[in-house]
């Protein structure tokens, strides 16, 4: 990244705070100015992490016109405002949005449809032509996250941990970040399923059916026109074979879908939202609104 000097208020910053990675994209006049990527942090520590980054880049609340954070697991207005307040001073304007919504806006470039996200966790979000939003899943590792990396890893451990073989599973539970460690087992489960392992195939097929059910649920609630536009996000759905299985499960459920590759990543959508937020507060915008 580069420092901004003598151009106060021109910088728009988007942050994608995911389950395992944090990504930052800075734009100046619509052009990428810099990027940062690293291990994720808890939202309570996000302010400290960003303040260190701001200091390194010689940014301030005056040089950053707008900051938009797409955060995992934050949905209510109260939660979003609380995090935005903790980030006060980093930008002239701060907005917090759910990460899945940013992912949908980026993937479908603002069009109506459904985004299915499966990484460490899982969730589906949808948006209709009138701008109405809804979601399915996203209840976290204790109550949901079906078809996600954590869910696949957990189901594999449950199916294979017997007798003395239970010790590796217990070690994972006691490890630091057990959810992430268990989610890291997912690629191996998918590989075993592709090679014909019966237990892995059962687990993977069930996970794919769960994700398809989320897409179907949203499509019906929003009454989206057929074929429904569907895109994806997350490391698990980045596997072509696994994603194709979700498509087949969706077809068996009777929903016609048009799958499209994500137009842009969530961090880019967050940065574009930051540009719009900055524009609302720019001298030109205020002058034209009089």
Image (cartoon, rainbow, N blue to C red):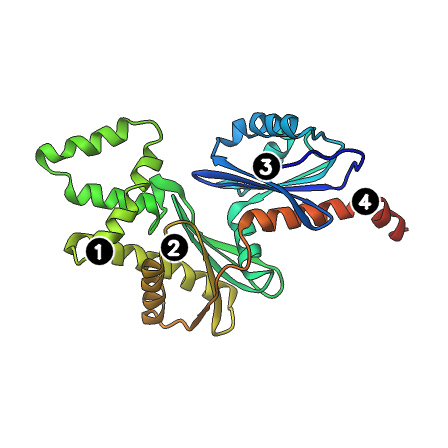
Circle 4 packing at 10 Å, graded few (<14), some (14-19), many (20+), is some
Q: At 60% from the left edge and 66% from the top edge, which residue is drawn?
A: 129
| Label 2 SS | loop
Residue in the foreground of this view, choosing between 57 and 107: 57
Q: How many marks?
A: 4
| Sooner in the amino-acid sequence: mark 3 or mark 1 | 3
Give the number of the mark in front: 3 or 4.
4
| Residue linked to disc 4 | 282
Under tag 3, what secondary structure?
helix
Circle 1 sits on which residue? 193
Using the numbered discs, state the Cα–Cα distance from disc 3 to disc 1 in whole angstroms: 42 Å
**Which residue is identified by label 3?**
78
Mark earlier in primary sequence (3, 4): 3
Label 4 – label 2 distance at C-alpha: 39 Å
Mark 2 or mark 1, which is nearer the start of the sequence?
1
Across and down, in percent, residue 28 comes to: 71, 45
Question: Could you give the CA–CA distance between mark 1 and mark 4, rounded to whole angstroms?
Answer: 54 Å
Task: Judge whether 80 appears above or below 51 on screen.
Answer: below
Q: Are marks 3 and 4 in contact (CB under 8 Å)?
A: no
214 and 108: which one is in front?
108
Residue marked by disc 2: 237
């Amino acid at each position: 990244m580069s420092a901004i000097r003598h151009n106060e208020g021109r910088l728009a910053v988007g942050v994608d705070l995911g389950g395992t990675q944090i990504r930052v994209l800075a734009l100046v006049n619509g052009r990428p100015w810099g990027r940062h990527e690293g291990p994720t942090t808890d939202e309570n520590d996000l302010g400290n992490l960003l303040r260190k980054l701001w200091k390194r880049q010689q940014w301030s609340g005056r040089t950053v016109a707008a900051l938009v954070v797409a955060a995992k697991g934050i949905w209510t207005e109260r939660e979003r405002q609380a995090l935005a307040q903790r980030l006060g001073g980093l930008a002239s304007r701060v907005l917090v949005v759910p990460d899945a919504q940013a992912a949908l806006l980026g993937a479908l470039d603002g069009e109506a449809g459904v985004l299915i996200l499966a990484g460490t966790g899982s969730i589906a979000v949808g948006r209709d032509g009138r701008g109405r939003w809804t979601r399915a899943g996203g209840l976290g590792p204790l109550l949901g996250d079906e078809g996600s990396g954590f869910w696949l890893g957990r189901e594999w451990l449950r199916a294979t941990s017997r007798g003395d073989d239970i010790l590796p599973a217990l070690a994972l539970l006691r490890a630091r970040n057990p959810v992430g460690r268990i989610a890291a087992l997912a690629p191996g489960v998918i590989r075993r399923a592709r090679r014909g392992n019966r237990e892995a195939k059962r687990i993977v097929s069930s996970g794919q059916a769960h994700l398809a059910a989320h897409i179907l649920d949203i499509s019906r609630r929003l009454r989206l026109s057929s074929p429904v536009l569907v895109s994806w996000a997350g490391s698990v759905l980045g596997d072509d074979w696994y994603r194709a299985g979700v498509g087949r499960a969706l077809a068996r459920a009777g929903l016609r879908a048009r799958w499209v590759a994500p137009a842009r990543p969530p961090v880019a959508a967050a940065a574009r939202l930051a540009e719009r937020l900055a524009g609302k507060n720019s001298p030109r915008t205020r002058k034209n609104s009089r």
